[in-house]
Image: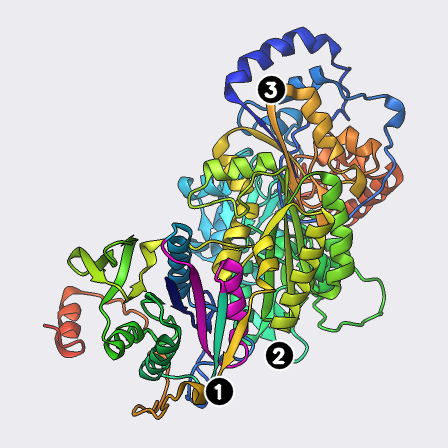
């Protein structure tokens, strides 16, 4: 992930620069990228290579346009709204609707209270704010079905919402969509201690699931910074990746089944618990990562892994990015099956965290250019430890590593993770920032950060960090990414932020098919409108 | 001067422990074990004293099963000069440990013995005091401020945390010091030090070598979890509240 942290004092300079460079801006058409890439979900889908459909449009990255885009985003949360209009085909909320909801859900679970609505209307980054007047809290799948059936018949647009920790504005209304929050559907339905299959409702908080599994000796196959608030339904709907993807793979592999409700209220029971089931088309994959635009996930069946007690964590310093890459290759080769995380952050990220968070110190005594976190998880304490030490000492001798420490207990390990996981938090405190989550071929990864630094100079602080193990770094500029055959959203999804950007990573034919599927499953387009797919396909 | 530091291998502080079904103790199978946090602080303090020039050697000692060697390796990686592993198959209570440490002290002749104030698995807070008593040495427990050594006069000045605040003691050397949380922040084990630690010696000793009588007068009868907190009750009126306080909780 690369963050461009813009210093406030340079704001004046940026504005004046904008004026003089505005003539350089290319013409806008309906497909022009609004830009805003900020979202930071710790996931990684690995490298995706898609040809850029817009190659012939000759969009060269230029400083003026970037500055122009930066200036646009100074105003709070209005960015996407200024680009898209409310679909006039959607109805507006009427008192009879509220009465109906109160009838089927009970008064307590129909929220019109302004304070609660304000929180539900605003995303975690405080960058997007909708103006919904109603939030519904269904307790079970049947209620979700009734709600959607009614909304579909009334043409009322809705936003499925879980923990509201998404970073692309996908979990909050753009206009006045009704919020359907599944937070009350938080029961664990079953857990098989032999196979490790967990079946639970979509509103279960990830950390709570992890705690439950811990008592049984199992772990969730995903872990992310937002675990204390995010829901498993949201994780599945956004195909969250996170810190453990390198070890356990993506949700497309670990989710065995799910139950979802489509726009017209139909309940699709695809809640299998079998690892092998080749009967017909595997439709659950459509819902995984569709960001609530094809249906609301209400139950999830997921394969969990046995907990292994031997966890080791090392915090390493490397001189240059090439060493980091070589270290990754060597780690995979030498640590093999016990490698469970490989994260990196650069010097700027470290400084940011040290400056803005309390009680954090640099584990490595010297300040270096790059820092790597390597984690191993296995079943043999002494064996794993020796393996990690041997690998690191060899790397030290070979000069790949300039310094490093190994955590001696869980407390020390937590403090190392705090540094990596705390970057987003530190950025929030530091001020306005632009975050991009992109995946690129490993060799290109840091070039974009350097490229950016060269172009922006003192205007902004550019930093890079991410799940190096999965090939993820979140650099700037979709075009740079597209040109170098990367994906504009490795992990965080498209949401509202990048709804119009999909062409940077997917061909027109592919997108056309996506639109067809969307229209098939949700003809009126009431599920999470204005997001994921380009607006032009759905405007009347 | 030599400093002897006793370090204990315990269940990691961050682990959620469970009691074994047969109630004989805490389940330690497949749980992460680490050096007792207070022992880490003790070792860190000993290292700082050595780095300040007041001591020549820091010796780490651990008593227990073969895996204790891992704990000693951590100590060596932090900077201790050598380790001693006293082999024992079962876990011992503080008095037995104290007797073992006394025997070791008779052999090694340290000028200072550092221990953590208590272990996080039994919370006894007895070993340091017992060692001092057995040796007839002065003790400064719950040390919370940097220990200053006066080389010429052969005594140490220690600030200790007591209920009423801070107490400053001056103890003649040799002495026993147990360390409290705020004394220092232990260093991380760096890769270069881990490398150096591989060549540092760990001496194995047995209880027979030390001629220690391990018979204990204390037997652990049962280990149970504390009773689960009962959920609260919402009362509908003040009268009901008073009734419950009087007749159920018996506090009024």
- x, y percent for residue B144: 28, 56
Please tell me whether residue B240 is drawn above or below residue A520 in the rendered image. Answer: below
Could you tell me if the residues under marks 1 and 3 are in contact, i.e. CB atoms within 8 Å?
Answer: no
> Residue visible at 81% across and 33% down?
A482
Please tell me which residue lies in front, B124 or B96.
B96
Q: Residues within 10 Å of mark 2 (few under 14, many from 20)?
A: some
Residue at the outermost left position: B252
Q: Chain of mark 1?
A: B
Specify start and end residues of the magenta stretch as a single range: B54-81
Disc 1 from disc 2: Cα separation: 33 Å
Q: Earlier in the sequence, mark 3 or mark 2?
A: 2
> Residue visible at 51% across and 36% down?
A428
Instruction: Tell me, yes or no, whether the highlighted magenta stretch contains residue A307.
Output: no
Residue B89: give its label.
1
Disc 1 from disc 3: Cα separation: 64 Å
Q: Chain of mark 3?
A: A
> Which residue lies under the disc numbered 2?
A193
> Which residue lies under the disc numbered 3?
A459
Q: Quadrant of the C terminus of chain A?
A: top right
Colour treatment of the image: rainbow
What SS does tag 2 mark? Answer: loop
Please tell me whether residue A143 is drawn above or below residue B30 in the rendered image. Answer: above
Disc 3 and disc 2 on one polypeptide chain: yes
- x, y percent for residue A253: 75, 62
């Amino acid at each position: 992930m690369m963050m461009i942290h813009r210093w406030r004092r340079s704001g004046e300079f940026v504005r004046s620069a904008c004026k003089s460079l505005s003539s350089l801006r290319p013409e806008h058409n309906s497909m022009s990228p609004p830009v805003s890439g900020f979202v930071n979900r710790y996931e990684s889908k690995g490298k995706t290579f898609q040809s850029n459909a817009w190659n012939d449009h000759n969009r060269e990255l230029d400083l003026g346009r970037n500055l122009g885009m930066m200036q646009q985003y100074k105003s709070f949360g209005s960015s996407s709204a200024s680009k898209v209009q409310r679909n006039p085909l959607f109805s507006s909320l009427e008192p009879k609707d509220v009465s109906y909801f109160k009838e089927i859900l009970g008064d307590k679970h129909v929220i019109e209270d302004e304070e609660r609505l304000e929180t539900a209307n605003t995303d975690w980054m405080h960058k997007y704010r909708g103006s919904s007047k109603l939030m519904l809290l269904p307790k079970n799948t049947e209620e979700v079905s009734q709600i959607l059936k009614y909304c579909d018949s009334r043409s009322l647009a809705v936003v499925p919402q879980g923990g509201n920790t998404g970073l692309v504005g996908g979990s909050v209304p753009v206009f006045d969509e009704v919020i359907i929050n599944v937070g009350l559907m938080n029961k664990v339905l079953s857990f098989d201690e032999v196979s490790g299959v967990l079946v639970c409702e979509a509103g279960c908080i990830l950390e709570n699931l992890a705690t439950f599994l811990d008592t049984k000796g199992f772990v969730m196959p995903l872990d992310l910074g937002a675990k204390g608030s995010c829901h498993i339904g949201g994780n599945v709907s956004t195909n969250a990746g996170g810190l453990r993807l390198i070890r356990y793979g993506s949700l497309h592999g670990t989710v065995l089944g799910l139950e979802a409700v489509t726009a017209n209220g139909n309940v699709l029971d695809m809640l299998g618990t079998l690892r092998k089931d080749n009967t017909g088309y595997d439709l659950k994959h459509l819902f995984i990562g569709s960001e609530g635009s094809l249906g609301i996930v209400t139950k999830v069946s997921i394969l969990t892994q046995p907990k292994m007690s031997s966890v080791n964590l090392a915090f390493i310093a490397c001189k240059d990015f090439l060493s980091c890459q070589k270290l990754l290759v060597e780690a995979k080769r030498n640590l093999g099956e016990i490698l469970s995380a490989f994260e990196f952050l650069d010097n700027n990220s470290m400084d940011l965290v040290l400056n803005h968070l309390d009680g954090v110190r640099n584990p490595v005594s010297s300040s270096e250019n790059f820092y790597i976190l390597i984690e191993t998880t296995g079943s043999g304490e002494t064996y794993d430890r020796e393996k990690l030490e041997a690998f690191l000492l060899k790397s030290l001798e070979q000069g790949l590593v300039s310094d490093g420490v190994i955590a001696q207990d869980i407390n020390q390990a937590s403090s190392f993770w705090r540094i990596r996981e705390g970057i987003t938090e530190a950025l929030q405190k530091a001020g306005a920032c632009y975050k991009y989550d992109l995946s690129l071929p490993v060799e290109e990864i840091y070039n974009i950060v350097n490229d950016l630094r060269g172009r922006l100079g003192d205007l902004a602080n550019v930093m890079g960090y991410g799940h190096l193990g999965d090939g993820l770094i979140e650099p700037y500029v979709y075009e740079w990414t597209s040109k170098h055959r990367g994906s504009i959203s490795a992990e965080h999804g498209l949401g509202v932020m990048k709804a119009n950007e999909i062409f940077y990573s997917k061909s027109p034919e592919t997108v056309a098919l996506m639109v067809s599927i969307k229209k098939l499953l949700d003809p009126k387009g009431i599920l999470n409108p204005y997001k994921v797919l380009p607006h032009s396909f759905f405007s009347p | 001067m030599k400093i002897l530091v006793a370090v204990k291998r315990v269940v990691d502080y961050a682990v959620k422990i469970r009691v074994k079904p047969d109630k004989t103790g805490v389940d330690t199978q497949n749980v992460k074990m680490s050096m007792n946090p207070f022992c880490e602080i003790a070792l860190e303090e000993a290292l700082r004293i050595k780095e300040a020039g007041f001591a020549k050697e820091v010796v780490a000692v651990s008593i227990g099963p073969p895996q204790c060697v891992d704990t000693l390796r951590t100590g060596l990686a932090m900077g201790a000069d050598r380790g001693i592993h006293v082999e024992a198959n079962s876990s011992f209570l503080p008095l037995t440990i104290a007797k073992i440490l006394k025997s070791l002290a008779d052999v090694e002749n340290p000028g200072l013995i550092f221990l953590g104030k208590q272990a996080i698995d039994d919370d006894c807070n007895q070993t340091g005091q017992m060692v001092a008593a057995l040796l007839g040495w002065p003790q400064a427990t719950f040390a919370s401020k940097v220990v200053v050594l006066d080389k010429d006069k052969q005594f140490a000045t220690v600030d200790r945390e007591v209920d009423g605040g801070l107490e400053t003691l001056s103890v003649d050397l040799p002495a026993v010091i147990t360390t409290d949380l705020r004394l220092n922040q232990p260093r991380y084990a760096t890769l270069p030090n881990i490398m150096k630690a591989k060549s540092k010696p760990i001496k194995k000793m047995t209880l027979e070598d030390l001629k220690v009588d391990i018979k204990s007068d204390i037997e652990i009868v049962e280990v149970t979890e504390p009773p689960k907190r009962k959920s609260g009750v919402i009362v509908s009126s003040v009268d009901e509240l008073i009734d419950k306080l009087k007749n159920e909780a018996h506090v009024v």
